[in-house]
Image (cartoon, grey):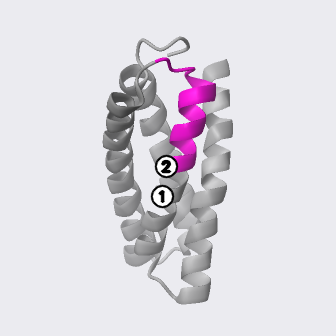
Amino acid sequence: MLQFLLFALVGCAAAVGHYGVLILLSEAFAVAPVAASAAGFVVGGVISYVLNYGHVFHSDQKHLPTAGKFVAVALTGLAFNSVVMWVLAHEAGLHYLLSQVAATLIVMVWSYTANRYWTFAGSAAG
């Protein structure tokens, strides 16, 4: 449970980067919500990897294979994020930030599970 709480705190830091880019691109540059969210997702992903590797899962694994697994999980998460954003923002007409909150919750569950049991499996805290 503590590990999930740490993961959620890291997720908050990553969300600041993600939502910051999303809002900046959407509001200042009129970028479509799905594309702006995808760009923010990448920024959040970098923050998430660095903090999860060192502080949540205390990984002692080599970065290259671990980062490869993390990217695979993140790309799947990006696909989930983009589908949810498309359905809620474009098809259902919800505001892009409400759509992003729903997408974030879905991706958080996916990401924790996949990273805990695959990406960082066998790490000190994984």
On the image, numbered disc 2 is attached to which residue?
Answer: 45
Residues at discs 1 and 2 in contact (Cβ within 8 Å): yes
Q: In the image shown, does 77 or 125 lie closer to the viewer?
A: 125
Magenta highlight on residue 110: no
User: For the residue labelled by badge 1, is the local secondary structure a helix, a strand or a loop?
Assistant: helix
Mark 2 residue type? Gly
Height in image: 103 above or below 59?
A: below
Q: Which mark is residue 117?
A: none
Label 1 sits on residue: 41
- Across the whole image, how many numbered discs are drawn on residues? 2
Quadrant in which the N terminus is drawn: top right
The crowding category of the residue bearing disc 1, from other C-alpha atoms within 10 Å (few below 14, some 14 to 19, many at least 20), is many
Comparing 18 with 64, the one in front is: 64
The amino acid at mark 1 is: Phe
Up/down of 62 relative to 79, above or below: above
Q: Which residues are magenta?
A: 46-60
Q: Is 37 placed above or below 32 here?
A: above
Residue at 35% x, 33% y: name it. Answer: 64
**Residue at left offset 61%, top offset 74%:** 23
- The rendered magenta stretch, by its main secondary structure, is classed as helix
Place of residue 98 in the rendered image (x, y in percent of width and height, measured from the top left): 58, 66
- Pinpoint residue 22: horizontal percent, then vertical percent: 56, 70
Write the residue at 56% across / 32% down.
52
From the viewer's perspective, tell me whether residue 12 is left or right of residue 73.
right
Q: Based on the displayed image, in which of its 4 quarters is residue 84 positioned?
A: bottom left
